[in-house]
Image (cartoon, rainbow, N blue to C red):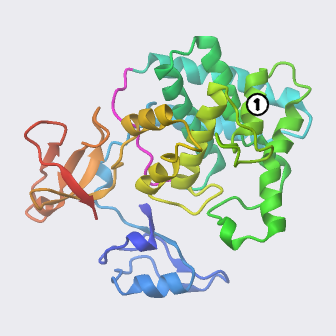
């Protein structure tokens, strides 16, 4: 089962879950074979995503840098700590110290060289935090961070959206263009609230606190809350990683494709050029589950990454109709290039 944007549907997909209106009325039942003409009707009803059966999912091996079970354990530990935290009760957050150290230890031990997968995301705050943490560690490794500096940066990542624990706002799949000023102001308060809650916590490094405060700032001073032009590498790292992951996950944003997310962070007035180039090398342009067409005219689905972020391993979908499983590593000189995602 996979969640798809309605705009991504091609027709003939089979629904894995009922499609319901806001009042709970079922308009399409699980098992329905979708037609291409349904896209317009679903969009008109403000239904943006649906869950469909994915016959290729069993072949996919997405790369999260960590073992999947380890990734989920870290995510659940983070959820447990933050969801039970009470404002200004800093001791309840100190468990993040050991969690952060464990995350850095596992990251340092990994031999993974394949590009990171960011496909099939949900607007879950804790999943979002885990992916930002991984991206910041990738950047930190490229910049030669020491163990201590990496741990401090990870702490900033784990705490960066702490302010949402004190707010009753819906940050999922939202659009500032469709929000009123009061709603926007409420969303933006999470940076100040998170920073204020940590002010008296001496165990939290100052750079980690600054990451919490400034993760929505931009190089040109166009961000919030203070419109600062931060020079600290850690602050710039979390700014670009947060902007990218918000786009692909739908946290604080309508969900966008990986291509669109890269377009956002390619603005070098707002984000550091070198960091953008590193992320483009380290994050799969075509994540596992992406349908693509190669230059030899064949349709395929990406099933895993290689060390080349633009040349994954694909499974040719047409061959399955003939009961054959044909895969190809596109990171070879002889392999065809991907010409488009479909």
User: Disc 1 marks which residue?
Assistant: 210
Position of 113 with respect to 218 (left or right) is left
Work out whether residue 126 can be spotted: yes
Q: Is residue 116 magenta?
A: yes
Q: Is residue 198 above or below residue 299?
A: above
Q: Is residue 81 visible?
A: no
Q: Residue at x 36, y 87 (%)?
A: 37
Callout 1 environment at 10 Å: few (<14), some (14 to 19), or many (20+)?
A: some
Closest to the observer, 39 or 224: 224
Q: Position of residue 160 (x, y in %)?
A: 71, 38
| Residue 143 is a magenta residue | no
Magenta region, residue range: 111-121
Q: Please tell me in which quadrant of the rendered image residue 114 appears.
A: top left
- Image quarter of the N terminus: bottom left
- Identify whether 339 is placed above or below 161: below
Residue 109: x percent and y percent?
Answer: 45, 16
């Amino acid at each position: 089962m996979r969640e798809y944007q309605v705009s991504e549907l091609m027709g003939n997909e089979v629904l894995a879950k009922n499609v319901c209106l806001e009042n709970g009325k079922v308009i399409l039942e699980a098992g329905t074979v979708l037609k291409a003409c349904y896209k317009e009707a679903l969009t008109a009803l403000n239904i943006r995503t649906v869950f469909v059966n994915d016959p290729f999912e069993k072949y996919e091996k997405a790369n999260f840098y960590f073992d999947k079970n380890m990734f989920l354990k870290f995510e659940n530990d983070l959820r447990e700590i933050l969801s039970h935290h009470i404002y200004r009760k800093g001791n309840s957050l100190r468990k993040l110290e050991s969690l952060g150290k464990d995350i850095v230890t596992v990251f340092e031990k990994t031999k993974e060289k394949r590009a990171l997968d960011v496909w099939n995301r949900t607007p879950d705050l804790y999943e979002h935090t885990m992916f930002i943490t991984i991206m910041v560690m990738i950047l930190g490794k490229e910049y030669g961070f020491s163990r201590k500096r990496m741990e401090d940066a990870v702490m900033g990542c784990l705490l960066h959206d702490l302010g949402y624990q004190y707010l009753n706002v819906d940050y999922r799949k939202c659009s500032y263009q469709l929000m009123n000023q009061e709603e926007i102001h409420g969303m933006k308060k999470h940076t100040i609230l998170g920073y204020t809650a940590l002010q008296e916590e001496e165990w939290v490094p100052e750079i980690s606190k600054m990451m919490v405060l400034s993760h929505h700032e931009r190089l040109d001073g166009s961000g919030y809350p203070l419109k600062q032009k931060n020079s600290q590498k850690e602050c710039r790292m979390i700014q670009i990683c947060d902007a990218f992951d918000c786009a692909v996950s739908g946290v604080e944003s309508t969900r966008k494709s990986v291509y669109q997310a890269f377009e956002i962070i390619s603005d070098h007035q707002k984000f550091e050029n070198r960091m953008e180039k590193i992320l483009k090398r380290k994050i799969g342009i075509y994540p596992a589950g992406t349908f693509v067409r190669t230059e030899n005219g064949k349709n395929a689905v990406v099933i895993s990454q290689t060390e080349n972020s633009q040349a994954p391993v694909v499974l040719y979908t047409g061959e399955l109709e003939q009961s054959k499983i044909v895969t190809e590593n596109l990171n070879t000189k002889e392999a065809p290039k991907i010409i488009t995602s479909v």
